[in-house]
Image: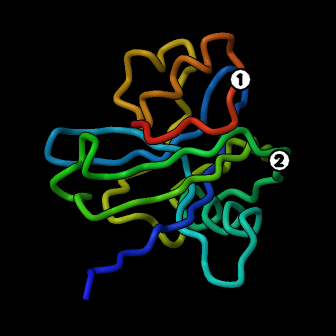
């Protein structure tokens, strides 16, 4: 019988305030890196509910969903974390979100395994920061997110 693996559905947030992008600060054997806040969708939960819950858990902020920006696939065996993610396949739905008080960003009550903090990353400096997915950095060059394609494919 073939080994059936599932594809995980996730929701992530793009939050921009005063020229900075909200990011979850992570650490691995190579050092610090950053990702968008968010995570796996739970059964019976909408994507909007998932991104709101995940942001509260990881970065301690209530977010207001504005609109969907893009969908990204992540097939782990094809990217930097291939040893750790060789059997991992995730479909990420990324939303533009707003927060009421950006100064309240802090690690939430349920952080990710490799999470070591929360950061506001200067969009101007984003090109020189270890940030995943790398593929979206170019869409922030204007200072605000501009995604001409809704589906970005398998990228990192």
Q: What is the tally of numbered marks visible in this picture?
A: 2
Q: Is residue 95 above or below residue 89?
A: above
106 or 87, nearer to the observer? 87
Percent coordinates x, y for residue 111 in the rendering? 45, 65
Disc 2 crowd, CA 10 A, few/some/many (<14, 14-19, 20+): few
Disc 1 crowd, CA 10 A, few/some/many (<14, 14-19, 20+): few
Q: Is residue 31 above or below residue 91?
A: above
Give the secondary structure at mark 2.
Answer: loop
Viewer-side label of 2, 1: 1
Residue at 41% across, 45% down: 25
Q: Which mark is residue 148?
A: 1
Residue at 51% across, 22% down: 137
| Residues at discs 2 and 1 in contact (Cβ within 8 Å) | no
| Viewport quadrant of the C terminus | top left
Q: In the image, is 129 to the left or to the right of 102? A: left
Percent coordinates x, y for residue 141 in the rendering? 60, 12
Residue 145 visible in this rendered orientation of the protein: no
Give the secondary structure at mark 1.
Answer: loop
Q: Is residue 92 above or below residue 126?
A: below
Q: In the image, is 15 to the left or to the right of 82? A: right
Examine the image and state in which quarter residue 101 appears: top right
104 or 137, nearer to the observer? 137
How was the colour assigned to the protein in this rendering? rainbow
Disc 2 target residue: 100
Percent coordinates x, y for residue 19 in the rendering? 67, 20
Q: In the image, is 76 to the left or to the right of 70? A: left
């Amino acid at each position: 019988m073939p080994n059936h693996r599932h594809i995980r559905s996730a929701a992530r947030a793009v939050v921009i305030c005063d020229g900075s992008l909200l990011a979850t600060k992570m650490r691995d054997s190579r050092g610090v890196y950053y990702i968008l806040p968010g995570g796996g969708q739970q059964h019976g939960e909408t994507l909007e509910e998932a991104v709101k819950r995940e942001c509260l858990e990881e970065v301690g902020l209530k977010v207001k969903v504005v609109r969907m920006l893009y969908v990204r696939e992540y097939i782990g065996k094809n990217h930097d974390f291939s040893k750790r993610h060789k059997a991992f396949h995730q479909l990420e739905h990324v939303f533009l979100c707003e927060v009421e008080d950006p100064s309240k960003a802090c690690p939430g009550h349920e952080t990710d395994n490799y999470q070591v903090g929360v950061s506001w990353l200067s969009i101007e400096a984003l090109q020189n920061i270890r940030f995943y997915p790398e593929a979206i950095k170019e869409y922030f060059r204007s200072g605000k997110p501009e995604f001409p394609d809704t589906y970005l494919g398998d990228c990192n």
